[in-house]
Image (spheres, helix red, strand yellow):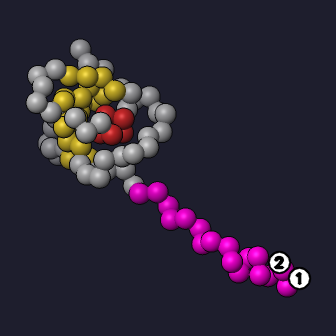
Amino acid sequence: MLAVATLFACAAPPSPPPESPPAEVRAPSDPDAPVACAPPRPEVCTMIYAPVCATLAGEMSQTQYSSPCNACADDRVVAYREGACE
């Protein structure tokens, strides 16, 4: 019995919950406006498929990502809009 109590007394505390995903910055009056990626950038994304078309910093091209999280995880992305690239 003493060994069991000692075992639980030395157990590590539970890990804190993961940080929330970055906030999205969007113009409130225009739902089609690009959404800026705000810090902190995500490190892990779920496998939800919700395609977005992202604008890369310093480039005139756009790249498609599988989700807003995946787009903002790329440091080159400055903003994205919902939906596939045209």
Classify residue 49 by image quadrant. top left
Q: How many numbered marks have been drawn onto this rendered protein structure?
A: 2
* Residue placed under numbered mark 2 in the picture: 4
Report if residue 78 lies within the magenta region.
no
Contact? badges 2 and 1 (CB < 8 Å): yes
**In the rendering, which numbered label is found on residue 1?**
1
Horizontal side, residue 85 vs residue 30: left or right: right
Left or right side of 44 for 51: left
Residue 39 place in picture, x, y as percent = 25, 51
Residue 60 in the figure: left or right of residue 8: left
Does 74 sit above or below residue 2?
above
Q: Is residue 68 above or below residue 10?
A: above
Element on which disc 1 rests: loop
**Badge 2 amino acid:** Val
> Please, what is the three-letter code of the amino acid marked with disc 1?
Met
Q: Position of residue 61 (x, y in %)?
A: 16, 20
Reply above or below: 59 against 13. above
Crowding at dot 1, Cα within 10 Å, few <14 / some 14-19 / many 20+, comes out as: few
Residue at image x 76%, y 76%? Answer: 7
As helix, strand or loop, the secondary structure at mark 2 comes to helix
Q: Which residues are magenta?
A: 1-19
**Label 2 neighbour load within 10 Å: few <14, some 14-19, many 20+:** few
Q: Quadrant of residue 67?
A: top left
Q: Is residue 11 magenta?
A: yes
In which quadrant of the rendered view does residue 59 lie? top left
Res 7 seen here: yes
- Residue most extreme to the top: 86
Q: Residue 71, percent across and down?
A: 31, 34
